[in-house]
Amino acid sequence: MIDTFYRIQSLHNLGVHIHLHCFEYGRPHQKELESLCETISYYPRKSGFVQHFSLLPYVVSSRKSKILLNNLIRNDYPILFDGLHTTYYINHPALSNRKKLVRLHNIEHKYYHNLANNELNVFKKIYFLFESAKLKRYEKVLGKADCILPISNSEQKYFNNEYHNAVLLAPFHPYSKTVSLPGTGEYILYHGDLSVNENALIADSLISNVFSRISYHCIIAGKNPPEHLLYNASLYSNIQVVSNPDNNEMTSLILNAHIHILPALATNGFKLKLLIALYAGRHCLVNSIIAESAYIGNLCHVADTDEEIIRKVNLLMQERFTEEMILARQKLLLENFCNLASAKKLVEVIFQAT
């Protein structure tokens, strides 16, 4: 949602008139969008059990609406589908003469396969595996798009090999400049949505293999941490879990940490939490999976094994974060992740496609 919101905001700032179509499933409407869009239309998501028996992926078949289709055919504007899951009507005859672009946040079938690999619940694992297979077959619909807009270099290569029409569009984010603080912080931070199994597994591994073996204050922060994670952290006096921090608390945690530890288990999409840490935090410590997939890897410290992580932590906790480091980071981030430049690139792609 971060990429989507700030993409809309950036296009609005360029004078683009946006008609936004959203499927809703429990989240409150975002009032901020009303000042950025010409119109906003909401549609109920078809989340009934019968949708799981469709040959289409559930995430796609549950997002169909005749009202949406009727709204789309009332004009001849270009259509930007936000994610493969929104493309139910991309091949509809009524839209055959329209210019269609698809923003892609990851390779969906690989993402769902990774979810299956990290899932302990057998029923959820089966669902993720079936959904992955359906998504892999369904992905061919991207051949109907005039242009697809992947979020990372590795995914641009994948989609160009498959469909030959991929243009890299960097992720949109909340920052116009770096706001990192010089100096030193007193703790190490890992943050993420802890209701996602991959993030919970990483946090558990950090507790058992890294944080429990160092003396520094370590904080794990994020949404809905599982009970076993809370218990494991409680066994160590230097480890703290911050559950469901609000935006202000999360911002403060990011700004004041001395080290951000942000490894990944698999390459998929773009880790926006790393980009946020680079814009607002101090030292960032990642593994090779992150460093190789993100074209900002040279702004990070890299360690793969637990021993390497501990060694790097001990070194970095003694290293002041300087103004020179902030300026170097600002330069590279501005070259690769400027929202204004990305929005201008998107507008050019839309008009080229038109």
Image (tube, grey):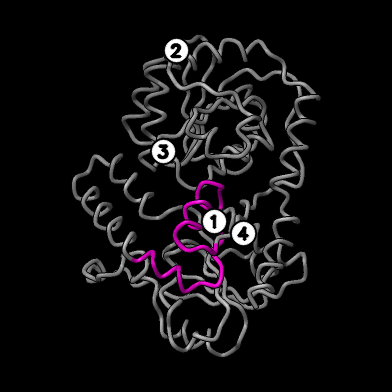
Amino acid at circle 3: Ala
Q: Earlier in the sequence, mark 4 or mark 2?
A: 4
Q: Give the x, y percent position of residue 112.
A: 34, 51
Amino acid at circle 1: Pro
Q: Is residue 333 left or right of residue 267?
A: right
Q: Give the x, y percent position of residue 98.
A: 56, 83
Q: How far apart are labels 3 and 4 at the CA level?
A: 25 Å
Q: How far apart are labels 4 and 1 at the CA level?
A: 17 Å
At numbered mark 4, what does the secondary structure look like: helix, strand or loop? helix
Residue bearing the label numbered 4: 5
In the rendered image, the quadrant that contains the C terminus is bottom right
Magenta includes 191? no
Q: In the rendered image, which quarter is residue 122 located in? A: top left
Q: Earlier in the sequence, mark 3 or mark 4?
A: 4
Q: In the rendered image, which quarter is residue 201 located in? A: top left
Residue bearing the label numbered 2: 307
Magenta includes 159? yes
Q: Earlier in the sequence, mark 2 or mark 3?
A: 3
4 or 1: mark nearer the eye: 1
At numbered mark 3, what does the secondary structure look like: helix, strand or loop? loop
Point out the stretch of residues depicted in magenta.
138-165
Amino acid at circle 2: Glu
Q: How far apart are labels 1 and 3 at the CA level?
A: 17 Å
Secondary structure mostly taken by the magenta-highlighted segment of the chain: helix
Residue bearing the label numbered 1: 150
Q: Which disc is residue 210 wearing?
A: none
Q: Is residue 209 above or below residue 56?
A: above
Residue bearing the label numbered 3: 266
At numbered mark 2, what does the secondary structure look like: helix, strand or loop? helix
Q: Earlier in the sequence, mark 4 or mark 1?
A: 4
Q: How far apart are labels 4 and 2 at the CA level?
A: 39 Å
3 or 4: mark nearer the eye: 3
